[in-house]
Amino acid sequence: MEIRLYFQMLRRGWWIIVLAALLALAASLVFSLLATPQYRATASFILIPSSTSLNTGPDVVRSYDTIGSVSVISTYAQIMNSGRIYADTLSMLKLQPQDVKGYTYQAAVLPNTTILELSVTGPDPNVVATLANAIGEQTIGYSDLINQVFVITFLDKAVPPTLPISPQPLLNAGVALVFGLIAGAALAVLREQLRIPLEAFRQRHRLDPVTGVYSNRYFPRVVDETLAGNPNDVFTIGFVELTGLRDAIESLPAASLQWILRKVTDLLRKELRGNDVIGRRNELSFELMLPNTSASAANRIFERIHQALSAPLELGALGITVSLDSRIGGAEYSNNISVSELFAKAENALSSARRDNANPIYVWEMKSPFWPQPESNIR
């Protein structure tokens, strides 16, 4: 299940993955074009006993055993890496330190051998080969002065390389493409994980948590959007108040009250059409929007809703019967009145419905642009 979810995230964010891969590939190619090529030359040396120091067979054996000691061969590697040898090399070549800025060198012992390998890296293939051989010559000369027992000599001299070790455009592009795909996939997953909590946050403010209908904060925005999209259409809004719950709201457990509100929501959905909108106005009332519905047509819908809510609800676990005693006030939008005016007309109609026990439904209708009837019960 988790793997399928991640695949869905990657599929939705495919463009992020492609974009990240292309950016990484482009950056790699630009780097390869702008980077200065680097060359590496390698010279190898072998350490052997001096012929003048060997008198008998046992001396030869002891000499090779001594050379095999890690400390001896490592000492020669350290001499080759020393600053003194490098300074003598530059002096011999008549070079200044700034002339070889950007060049590096490193001597290392090949495992389980008495062979040293010296590598010099830099932007000029001829210079790196010259430096490697010159450092080797200086090391050989210095070693001859301080030690007559062992001799270090060239095994292979360095030659100018023909191909740079870096940059390698194809290799760099391949690595960049792989890392770009990985980074893009990570960004796509991260984007989805950030978007889902954000959508949940928006949904939480958009919907009432108890009933699942629009919250009172968001419902006016729905009306505004409807009005902005169809400013000349006729529609009606209505407020459905559960007056019978007013006395029972403090005595009922929260779970029972939530069950009643969800039951009312189901009844409203059953009586309304698919494009009608339901909102939770407050703890005792709901708000409705009926698109393309005149006041007279809305009144008939409100009568059906009132009839559906007239049946008492039985709370079996508590042995209590609750009468909802609904009151409904509505207002028809027309003549370009504002949304606030429309809501005020509906509130006035609901107030009239509260006062008139004989007529629990009032719908305000614009009879004339010059002589509106502020409140009228349409039967």
Image (tube, helix red, strand yellow):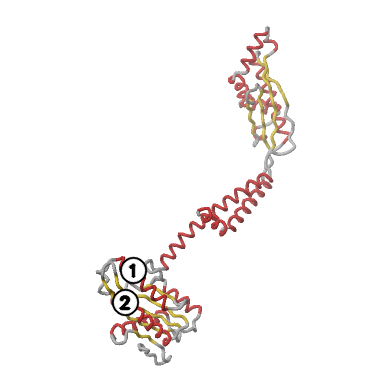
Find disc 1 in the rendering and name its residue. Answer: 259
Residue 193, given in percent of the width and then of the height, sits at 49, 56
- What amino acid does circle 2 point to? Leu
Residue 367, given in percent of the width and then of the height, sits at 41, 91
Q: Is residue 118 above or below residue 201?
A: above
Closer to the chain start, of discs 2 and 1, is: 2
- The picture quadrant where one finds residue 224 is bottom left
Q: Report helix, strand or loop for mark 2.
A: strand
Q: Is residue 77 above or below residue 336?
A: above
- What amino acid does circle 1 point to? Trp
Q: Is residue 70 above or below residue 230?
A: above
- The picture quadrant where one finds residue 290 is bottom left
Find disc 2 in the rendering and name its residue. Answer: 242
- The picture quadrant where one finds residue 46 is top right
Marks 2, 1: nearer the viewer:
1
Whether residue 129 sits left or right of residue 84 in the image: it is: right
Q: As rendered, which of 49 and 224 lies closer to the eye?
A: 224
- Residue at x-position 34% and y-position 78%: 309
Residue 169, given in percent of the width and then of the height, sits at 68, 45
Q: Quadrant of the C terminus?
A: bottom left
